[in-house]
Image (cartoon, helix red, strand yellow):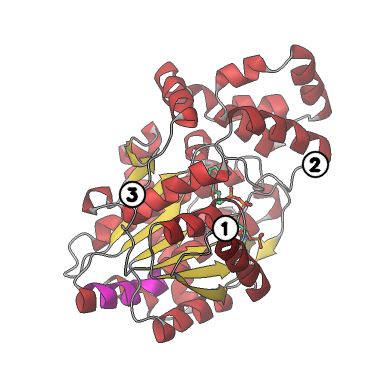
Amino acid sequence: MHLLATSIVNIRLPAIHALPPYTICKMAAREEHFLSILTESNFHKAVSVSYISHMLWAQWHTIPLPAPDFFAGQTVIVTGANIGLGLEAVRNFTRLGAARVVVACRNIEKSERAIKDVQASLPEAKTVFVPMDVDLGSFASVAAFAKRCALELDRVDAVVENAGLATGIYTTLEGHESTITVNVLSTFYMALLLLPLLRRTAVQHNVRPRLAIVSSEAHLLARFREQHAPNMFAAMQPPESMSHDRYNVSKLLELLLVRELATVLTDHSIPVTLNTLNPGMCRTQLFRGLPFGVRHIVNGVLHIIGRSSDMGSRTLVAAAAAGPETHGQYMDTAQVWKVSDFVSSKEGAAVQKRLLAELLEIFEGVEPGISKNLE
Ligand SMILES: NC(=O)c1ccc[n+]([C@@H]2O[C@H](COP(=O)([O-])OP(=O)(O)OC[C@H]3O[C@@H](n4cnc5c(N)ncnc54)[C@H](OP(=O)(O)O)[C@@H]3O)[C@@H](O)[C@H]2O)c1
């Protein structure tokens, strides 16, 4: 249910008003958490008039693609590339002349199906597709993926870490709640493991590679109670910590960690651009874990105001094509955009520092010495 609320909130206030009162009441009656979601989230703080007007504009805004040959000669990696925004990003990178696209999916069959789909729609394309499997539920799988990239790819110009999960059901992967493992831990583990390859590309090809992490405007809604715990990741481990806030928190953590990592990487002699982005509200399968009835309501709303997967994917392409001015920045509608008050506050800065320290401690337990990749 939290996802529905997140969706509705993301869809902006006028969309709530657009729903018949009977529907809203019925939803509230059926889903006991509905009202608490709105009151417990940062809904009131996040949804200002100026933000609503921006979002309404953004939702229907046509997002431009870079120049038709922008990715000529370049190698791009896309994770979660079999459906939704990832698949359409692969299609757009292909349209824009990418020499090679690594189509990284949970298993190789999904990669191969995605490649066939793109090839069928763009039969003239010269792009070489590399199917690869990576399961973000497993650190070993992420490490194996990064190792294969380092061995088989002579260059990587852009990485789009798009794979993500939204679930209200508590399960654990690698000892952490699955949303945190997939959206945050494995995502940043992959980023750290791919950094040496990106730097090698920079030196050998005289380019500035880009690494984009797909976050969300849901970060605005995160209450993130665990920020006050002595160890934030530990506080999100037990089943009783699971709440409707978890997806929003995972997207907030992505943003905070990009900002902190970018700060650490800023003075490195071999620069790599690290940015994050909001794809907006899009018609994808992200909400497939919702109960049947709720899913239909969400899909109905998405049908009216959601971006198509193609339009949403253009925000991923924009971040992957972006210049150094986007380093450490949050992009919305293909441009640098402002973050939540919390993220830009002193408290936010302190939390992001602690988060990176905790993250590196977890990674050192998995792969001792990995922190050196930041040096
Ligand atoms: N759609 C929106 O409105 C919206 C808004 C804001 C942000 N986003 C973000 O956009 C990104 C893409 O989402 P989407 O909307 O395109 O959703 P989607 O259609 O559900 O696609 C999600 C992708 O992530 C992959 N994935 C999930 N768990 C994985 C794992 N453990 N290992 C490897 N891959 C995994 C999925 O693979 P499987 O098919 O194997 O599950 C799928 O390819 C996500 O990070 C999401 O949070 C979406």
User: Residue visible at 82% across and 40% down?
Assistant: 292
Question: Which secondary structure is most common in the magenta stretch?
Answer: helix
In this figure, what is the number of numbered marks? 3
Looking at the image, is 182 positioned above or below residue 140? above
Instruction: Choose the circle earlier in sequence order: 1 or 2.
Output: 1
Q: Residue at x 71, y 59 (%)?
A: 171
**Residue at the farthest front position:** 124
Does the magenta run of residues contain 198?
Answer: yes
The 10 Å Cα crowd at callout 1, few under 14, some 14 to 19, many 20 or more, is few
Q: Residue 81 appears at what percent x and percent y? A: 56, 61
Badge 2 is on which residue? Answer: 291
Residue 57 visible in image: yes
Element marked by disc 1: helix
Q: Which residues are magenta?
A: 192-202
Which residue matches tag 1? 121
Residue labelled with disc 3: 66
Quadrant of the image for the N terminus?
top right
Q: CA distance from mark 1 to mark 3?
A: 20 Å
Q: Quadrant of ligand 1?
A: bottom right
The image quadrant of residue 73 is bottom left
